Image (tube, rainbow, N blue to C red):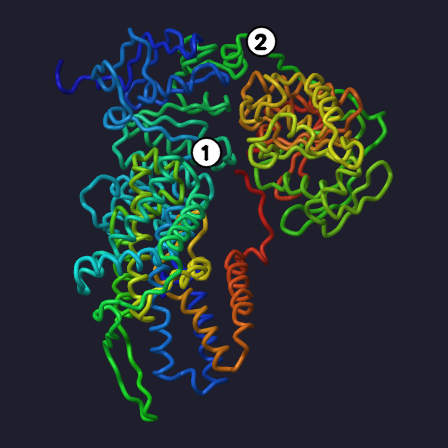
Amino acid sequence: MHSFLRAYPTEAKLLAVLILICIGLSIASPDFLTLVNFTSLLNNNAVNVIWAVGLLVVLIAGGIDISFAVAASVVQYLCVYAFAAIGGGNWAIGFLFAGGFGLALGLINAFLIHQFRIISIVVTISTFNAFFGLLMFFSSGRFLYNLPSWWSGRVILWEYQTASGTWAELILPVLVMAVCMAATWVLIRRTTTGRQLYAFGDNPEGARRAGISIGLMQAIAFGWCGMMAGIAGLMQAHITKEVVPNALIGRELEVLAAVVLGGARLGGGRGSVLGCFLGVLLVAVTQNGLNLLGVSPYAFKMVVGVIILLAISTSNLDPARLFVPRKGRKA
Amino acid sequence: MPADAVPPDALRFSGISKIFGGVKAVDDVSFTVGAGEVHCLAGENGCGKSTLIKIITGVYQPEPGAGMEIFGQAYAQISPTQARRAGIAVIWQDLALFAEMTVAENIAFETMLGNRPRAVSYARLHQVAAAALARLDVEIDLDARLGSLPIAQRQIVAIARALVSDARLIFMDEPTASLTQSETDALLAVVRTLSARGVAVVFVSHRLAEVLEISSRVTVLRDGKLVGVFPTDGLTQSRLTELMTGTVIAHDVMARDTGDNPEVLRIEGLTRAGEFEDISLSLRAGEVLGLTGLIGAGRTELCHTLFGMTRPDRGRIVLNGQDLQLRSNRDAVAAGIAYVSEDRLALGLIQPQSIADNTVLSVLRQITGAGGLLSSRKKDATVSHWISELAVKIGTPADAVSTLSGGNQQRVVLAKWLATRPKVLLLDCPTVGVDVGARAGIFRIVRALAEKGLAILLVSDEVPEVFLNADRVLHMAGGRIAHEWDPRQTGLPEMEAAVYA
């Protein structure tokens, strides 16, 4: 416990806040602490978590990606046409294609960033616009409803009828989310490549001098983010049973905020899978709570904005510093 | 040769030259380091030290005709990888460590490179890191985040990292530039431990006292040429300075009596809890008041308060007979106080911007013309005035400040503050990272400014600096003023003994 607190101070703080909010909400609303509400929270946020762990890897490597949500929309369209072309497909082909298309889009970002030495925010804002423009141009803004039945058919992993007769259930995206979280955790914590990503994000020049290949790091980070974006796109269409070209635009900032809330540092070298999960969940639980309390949905975004602002400004504040005068330091 | 014969020299380089665009940066230099020797490489900035290090570590290739031998093995060409494999490591001034990672990961970073194994073993990381620290006889918490450690410990981490990669010859570039005296002593102890265990160390430092204390021989370069290799026994700081600069620098006490000049700044009982306690001093026009003491003694904190950046808890600051209530450093500038910070690179200059823009940064309001817009005519006039006044060596004022040498950068910082026409100048460690020759230039400027009536508070952690250049010397320890000395009456050894006690 002690070592957890020391190694993950942000995550521990976040967890504490999340628990406090949950306690508060369960007192304020009888509907909050129910199995149905809990499972629907997970179902509704699985896609955001998948994006978040992808983006996490980019942030750890010192970059930023604005284009992933739009990339997910592009992947959805490509998948619809690809599945039609091969005559249907199945889940295995689905994951392969969605992950592959996403990976390719991520590698485009990595290539531009590395080859032309452009900072990632500029590159991904450009690809964000390029991806979206191309998508709208070729799709003419049309919605697609003709998804293969394996894709749009609801896959229920687990269900349970509560005493009141309502159903609590977990759907496929939750399992996919868990796998993506586990895979990302293995990548960044348990492989040397992952530790190199941290090192590269922390001190690029130091990493370069230590002999780490910068291009490879960018490719892995943005490739992973793209792959996760593609898989998230597949899951999102599975939930909504349709593909809408502008359905996902705007989600990138929501996810980015949640990841930063979860302790990832803009500028690289810090962040964890647990933090991502908690960050997404904190935003989700707050929205959920406001909803149950009957607060106008228009107020949601404002409240969420304030929470993120509070969380980030307090996480930069070291409580110890408030009481001890700063010593003279030399650079 | 029998197996138990004397081990070969760590390094035998001869006839090394390097030409950049027709200029000989290094000209026929020989450099030899014995196995396990602590050797110092001395010379002013631009003398070819860094070029030589880069040749030895394989970053640059020397001109043909060079003889290169590392641990007895001759090389026709050296690549960075070969140099590393041969056991050469460089600890750069910026350390190239990873602040967000743990101490263990930083030390054992090498084990995370390469293709096998792909899985991280945190147990092995710890083991490797602990072994490296044990070789240095140092204990550091392996799970601490590197960024939470003081610079001195990070330095040790960097050395331990070099050991992990089997370094047998470690280059240290200005390792003590930002360390306190006790931290420096600890580092020097580590260097001795390394040497005793057969690891040779090449030490590059501007602090000559250290150079003489730690190394057995010193190789001196000047203008890319070898001046000579000297044993440090019997070598003095002033002799070494002469060798490095090629000129005899006056080491005379500059103190004058300024007791008749009007008092400009008076401080009475100034206190800020945890930083400094009951400080009283008086500073006269034209006086250079030295303030020395160890880092953490409260010198810099006192400067910050005098410059309005922090508020005192108690006490008065009186400038020209008027009580000052400084709410911010803007108030201080308006009152006529200027502060040249100790961390020139990070705080004093905006590196990528031009020399001209940096010079006028503090006086933007004075160089506006019609409609409150910046007047480039006034700006050019201000810039050229100060450039010539302080004899800053520049290409054109439009060049980025980062293109200047340390000494010239320091002059630009001075120009920036002198442009505000201050009455009191707070100079906080003005020679950190500036080489010996340029230091003399800075102190000439300080002296000239004092002659014109400016009251100067000269803060330095190098006692000889204040001894030679100040009219009076205050010694600060533990947040209080411990001694007041007149350099014409108190000798340097006595001052040093008191400060480093």
The residue lying toward the viewer, choosing from A171 and B463, is: A171
| Residue that extends furthest to the left in the rendered view of this protein | B2
- Chain identity of mark 2: B
Badge 1 local density, few (<14 within 10 Å), some, or many (20+)?
A: some
Q: Is residue A15 left or right of residue B416?
A: left
Q: Is residue B186 left or right of residue B257?
A: left
C-alpha gap between disc 2 and disc 1: 29 Å
Any part of residue B389 in sight:
yes
Would you name the residue on which mark 1 appears? B185
Label 2: element kind: loop
Quadrant, the N terminus of chain B: top left
- Chain identity of mark 1: B
Q: How many marks?
A: 2
> Which amino acid does the dot numbered 1 rest on?
Asp
Q: Is residue B147 left or right of residue B336?
A: left
> Which amino acid does the dot numbered 2 rest on?
Val
Vertical position of residue A279 compared to residue B284: above or below: below
What x and y, as percent, mark residue B109? 30, 41
Vertical position of residue B312 compared to residue B151: above or below: below
Any part of residue B488 in sight:
no
Q: Which mark is residue B248?
A: 2
What x and y, as percent, mark residue A210? 32, 35
Q: What residue sits 82% from the left and 38% below the top?
A: B319
* Residues marked 2 and 1, same chain: yes
